[in-house]
Every structure is written in structure tokens, then in C-alpha cells.
Image (spheres, rainbow, N blue to C red):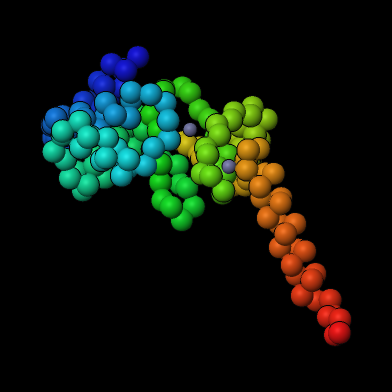
Amino acid sequence: MKSREQSIFRNYLERRGLKLTAERQGVFDELFARHEHVEADEILVRLRAKGKKISRATIYRTLELLVDSGIVGRVRIGEIGYRYERLRAGEHHDHLICNECGRVIEFFEPRIESLQDEVCERYGFLPISHSHQMRGICRQCRPRALKAEANAQATARALREPRLVS
Ligand SMILES: [Zn+2]
Ligand SMILES: [Zn+2]
């Protein structure tokens, strides 16, 4: 299945008169080794750990090419920046992103998909792609986040209450 994306990428580069260099292949292999949502700098660290000489600029340029060729997705993670994931043709999912720990949860909801199609139809709009993401607090982080919120409220209350002067 990896070879299919490999040939899509190779053809994409050829159409632009670009070569599948060792550096570009290295970034491709790193992203297609497993399904994950990974930052560009993490790819840099991993390739360097393997003894590959590659610049940050080359990583970013290669990621742009991979995203543009349609086989890699880019997920915006708030202020932090982007994470990248391999995509399989015909497969689609959306994301829930935890503000506390950065966890990325994938989901697929047919009702959301068909509602989006209805919206496009209403506007005579031909959909090509979409990304839907919700930010919030994941199940693991919720107890901690609720406790922090309760503490903040208790502190605010204590500050408002008149102090007893003895
Ligand atoms: Zn979390
Ligand atoms: Zn994903």
C-alpha cells in the first residue's frame, strides 16, 4: 500500500521536473512508517538520529510537496503549528485536539459528512476537501482540568469574601 503513495509522489515530482532525492525519500519514509500526527521538527530529529544530513528547510519544502501531492495531511494544532499525517486515498477522518496534552483523536461521523455535502449543495459549491477539527480537553485531561478550574473558583471566592479582622 505504501508503494501506491510512493508512485503518486514520484509522478507528482516528475510533473514538476523534480527528482525523488534521498532527502525527499527520507521524509516520505518517516511519514509512511506508521500512522501518526507528527511535527516537522520531530521528523528532523528522527532523520538526524539515523545519521541523515538534512536541513530543516528541506524538511519543510518536502512536507509542502507531500501535502500538495495529496498523500499527506496537515493538521493545525493551535499556536504550536502543524502536524503531518500520511493519508490513504479514499480514507477520510477529522480530528479532536486536546488543548492540555496535545493528543489528536481521529473520528469519522457520517452525519457530519453528509451535512457538509448538504451545505455545499445549498451554495452550489463543489467540495474538494475539508478539514474539521474540534479543540477541547480529552478524557484523560478532564479530571485535572476540572480540579484546576475548581481551585481557581475557590481562590476567586476567597478573595471576594470580606476578611475577618481579629
Ligand atoms: Zn489531553
Ligand atoms: Zn489524523
What quarter of the picture does the C terminus occupy? bottom right
In the figure, residue 54 lies in which quadrant?
Answer: top left
Does residue 138 sit above or below 88 in this rendering?
A: below
- The residue shown at (34%, 37%) is 67
The answer to whether 137 appears left or right of 6 in the picture is right
Closer to the camera, 50 or 104?
50
Identify the residue at image location x=66%, y=50%.
Answer: 145
Give whichever of 7, 123 is nearer the camera.
7
Q: How many marks?
A: 0
- Left or right: residue 89 compared with residue 42: right
* x then y, percent, for residue 128: 46, 36
Rendered view: 119 above or below 7? below
Most extreme residue toward the bottom is 165
Give me the residue at 59% from left, 28% from top: 108
Q: Is residue 23 above or below residue 153?
A: above
Question: Is there any visible trace of residue 75 in the rendered image?
Answer: yes
Asked if residue 134 shows in the view, the reply is: no
Q: Nearer the viewer, residue 35 or 1?
A: 35
Task: Tell me the quadrant of the picture where the N terminus can be found.
Answer: top left
Looking at the image, which residue is at 76% across and 63% down?
A: 153
Query: Where in the figure is residue 143, as x and y percent of width and height?
Result: 69, 44
Judged from this view, the residue extending furthest toward the front is 166
Choose top left, top right, bottom left or bottom right for residue 38: top left
